[in-house]
């Protein structure tokens, strides 16, 4: 009987002890998706509404490397200013993790943005755009894909220019932009 209890205790400690409790963007998105202060969207690649027969080989490859975007936006109002500061600090802390390699950062005291990525230079699995404005809120956009690279991103921009974006998927963000 003691041996069975020991084995059960050992298995439980392995299961619960091996769980990574460090914050990640994915956990942050899951925790805040239903929060009333946030607007959450999952945007699939079909939002681009592009005629694939008219794409170059490079553009097709870029489009194929893109899976989806997750958007999480905090809408600031008079009642949640303290929470805004707390939540923005959480995102900044997560993005300081070495797995998020920062490409660029710009802005001033009242607003700013950064672009980071996860993966290697030629095999990027995630781009992260983080933008904030002290009088409106902040947004975190995760662009998820397979083996994306900087060339694919540049080609994706040309695909975006030719696309007829389905704005219906973006309606929830209009509230945040109106401020």
Image (spheres, rainbow, N blue to C red):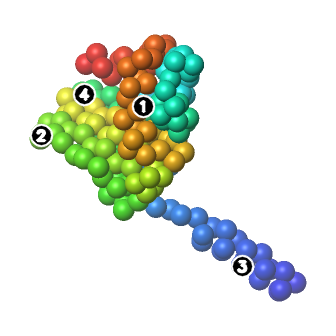
Which numbered disc, 3 or 1, marks the residue that appears first in the sequence? Answer: 3
Q: CB of mark 2 within 8 Å of CB of mark 3? A: no
Of the numbered discs 3 and 4, the one sitting upstream in the chain is 3
Q: Of label 2 and label 3, which has the lower sequence position? A: 3
Residue positioned most to the front: 57
User: Which residue position holds label 3?
Assistant: 10
Q: Nearer the viewer, mark 2 or mark 3?
A: 2
Q: Are marks 1 and 4 in contact (CB under 8 Å)?
A: no
For the residues labelled 2 and 3, the Cα–Cα distance comes to: 52 Å
**Disc 1 element:** helix
Label at residue 136: 4
Name which of mark 4 and mark 2 comes first in the sequence.
2
Badge 3 vs badge 4, beta-carbon distance below 8 Å: no
Residue at position x 18%, y 42% in the image: 106
Instruction: Work out whether residue 104 can be spotted.
Output: yes
Image coordinates of residue 51 in percent, x first then y, are 54, 16
Closer-to-camera residue (59/75): 59
Where is residue 22? Give x, y as percent: 46, 61
Please tell me whether residue 7 is drawn above or below residue 49 in the rendered image: below
Between circles 1 and 4, the one closer to the viewer is 1
Residue at position x 66%, y 74% in the image? 13
User: Which residue in the rendered view is the most extreme toward the right?
Assistant: 1
**Residue that numbered label 2 is attached to:** 108
Residue 32 visible in the picture: no
């Amino acid at each position: 009987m003691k041996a069975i209890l020991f084995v059960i205790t050992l298995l439980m400690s392995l299961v619960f002890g091996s769980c990574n409790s460090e914050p990640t963007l994915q956990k942050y998105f899951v925790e805040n998706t239903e929060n009333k202060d946030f607007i959450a969207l999952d945007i699939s690649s079909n939002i681009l509404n592009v005629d694939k027969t008219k794409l170059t080989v490079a553009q097709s490859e870029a489009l194929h490397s893109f899976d989806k975007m997750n958007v999480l936006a905090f809408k600031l109002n008079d009642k949640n200013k303290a929470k805004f500061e707390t939540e923005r600090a959480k995102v900044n802390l997560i993005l300081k993790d070495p797995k998020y390699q920062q490409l660029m950062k710009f802005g001033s005291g009242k607003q700013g943005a950064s672009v980071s990525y996860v993966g290697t230079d030629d095999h990027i699995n995630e781009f992260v755009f983080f933008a904030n404005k002290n009088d409106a809120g902040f947004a975190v956009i995760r662009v998820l894909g397979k083996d994306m690279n900087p060339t694919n991103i540049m080609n994706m921009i040309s695909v975006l220019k030719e696309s007829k974006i389905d704005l219906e998927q973006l309606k929830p963000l209009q509230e945040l932009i109106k401020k």
